[in-house]
Amino acid sequence: MDKAGITERVKEIAGKAATESGADLVHVEIAGTKRDAVVRVFIDKEGGVTLDDCSRVSRAMELVLDEEDVIPSRYVLEISSPGIERELYSLGDFEKFSGQLIKLKLKEAVEGQKTFVGALLNVDGSKITVDDRMRGPVTFEYSDVDKANLKIDLSKEFKGR
């Protein structure tokens, strides 16, 4: 099985394990070398992910991965939450976090700027609008996005304290 096939099978296994544990699969990535792979699985759920959630998903996945010998070498399986400044991996993530503060990096610069930070205003089809702190509202095609993350809005976090 090629790397794309292995990744797809791991996603299927991780999705089932996450669902059975009451969580949602956020993302799967396989890194490392052919001899020493690192399988990273990010899960999330309402109210946050606990260590027990990660352990349940890990045990369920290990059973299937080892039984089917999906990864033909040694591997380390890492299960975790996507974190407070989680990466946005899909157009669905952009829709889910509409209204949140994000940092977005484009593949190509627009008028000399590649990185934008601001509120995610809107997702319309494949178009994403961000209220950039420097330029105001700017709209991009999803396909032009290289990387995007949620950002902690410290002004909101410390307001009223």
Image: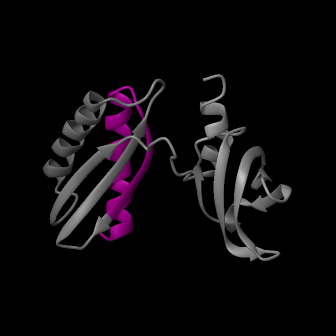
Rendering quarter of residue 159: top right
Q: In x, y percent, where is residue 90?
A: 59, 52
The residue at 50%/47% (across/down) is: 86
Q: In x, y percent, where is residue 56?
A: 24, 32
Q: In x, y percent, where is residue 42?
A: 39, 45
The residue at 58%/42% (across/down) is: 152
Q: Is residue 156 above or below residue 134?
A: above
Name the one closer to the observer, 107 or 143.
Answer: 107
| Total labels drawn | 0
Q: Which residues are magenta?
A: 1-30
Name the one closer to the observer, 111 or 82.
Answer: 111
Residue 5, magenta (yes or no)? yes
Residue 4, magenta (yes or no)? yes
How is the rendered protein coloured? one colour
Q: In x, y percent, where is residue 140?
A: 78, 61
- Quarter of the picture containing the C terminus is top right
145 left or right of 43 in image: right
* Farthest front residue in view: 161
Rendering quarter of residue 92: top right
Name the one closer to the observer, 47 or 27.
Answer: 47
Dominant secondary structure of the residues highlighted in magenta in the image: helix
Name the one closer to the observer, 142 or 17.
Answer: 142
The residue at 17%/65% (across/down) is: 72
Q: Is residue 160 above or below residue 30?
A: above
- Quarter of the picture containing the N terminus is bottom left
